[in-house]
Amino acid sequence: MPPLSAELYTKADILYPPVHLASEVRMSEAAERLRRANELARQERAAGEARAAGQRQAANRRADLLATAQPALETVLDALASQVIAVAPDANRGGGLLTLCLREATLRVGRVEMATMTAPFEVVGHTSIAIQIPRNQYGYEGRSHSLWYCDAEREGEFHWYEAAFMHSPFSRHATTVNPFALAPGEAAEAFRSGMTALQLAWPFVSLDQQMADFIDRWLGWFADAAGGTMQLPGRMPEQETGSWRGR
């Protein structure tokens, strides 16, 4: 049988491509899908790196703000402690940011912690100040206020602010400390519009602007606590509370 001509081979290849050529076509389609998947992975990695860089930058900014905030708060608390000791030298001063004890009353400020609240304003640090007394016949054990380092009034202008919270008279919640402090992450409900179960009991007041009033109030409450006359406030909220930007 005579051999097939080259021309016949060529025609056969056109009509019936060899298996390896069809495989190359299929691999090309698969390779394109894989290339697209790789591009998606690259984009996702770049986006993730950008987010991480942004988070690091934000964290560094908050840390820098908080480093400035701590000495400012210590200045106020040292002034408060000096006033207390000046008129009540038998008061015992403990450790931490501030701890003062006289008879059965304790005035205490907790350590400053970092915060990440961004709405309705930004909070970068927080602590609380409290007066503690033995539970009285009405189940009352004192009061505590939040101290937040935030830009409550003007965006980007950070100060220490004092505020306090309460449960709505229509809620079923009860507490032995009234009003009470909350961490920023616990207080979101108090900033919602309308009637909510959690509300502000004391407005946001800048310690920079009302340092003398802050010291005098807490000295007075500590005096009441040490004298055994501290009572639940007669009404709450005790002052107008629409005191932050956005209200």
Image: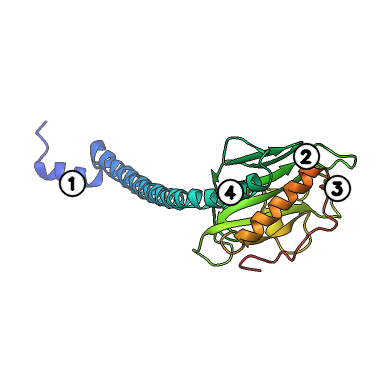
Q: Pick whichever, 137 or 181, lies toward us.
A: 137
- Give the CA separation, mark 1 to mark 2: 102 Å
Distance (Cα) linking label 2 and label 4: 20 Å
Total residue callouts: 4
Mark 2 lies on residue: 133
The percent coordinates of residue 53 (x first, y second) are 38, 49
Amino acid marked by disc 1: Lys
Q: Quadrant of the N terminus?
A: top left
Residue corresponding to mark 1: 11
Identify the mark at residue 242; answer none if there is no mark. Answer: none
Mark 2 surroundings within 10 Å by alpha-carbon count, few (fewer than 14), some (14 through 19), many (20 or more):
many
**Circle 2 SS class:** loop
Q: As shown in the figure, which amino acid type bears the numbered disc 3?
A: Arg
Residue hosting label 3: 172
Quadrant where the C terminus lies? bottom right
State the SS at label 4.
helix
**Residue 84 appears in view:** yes
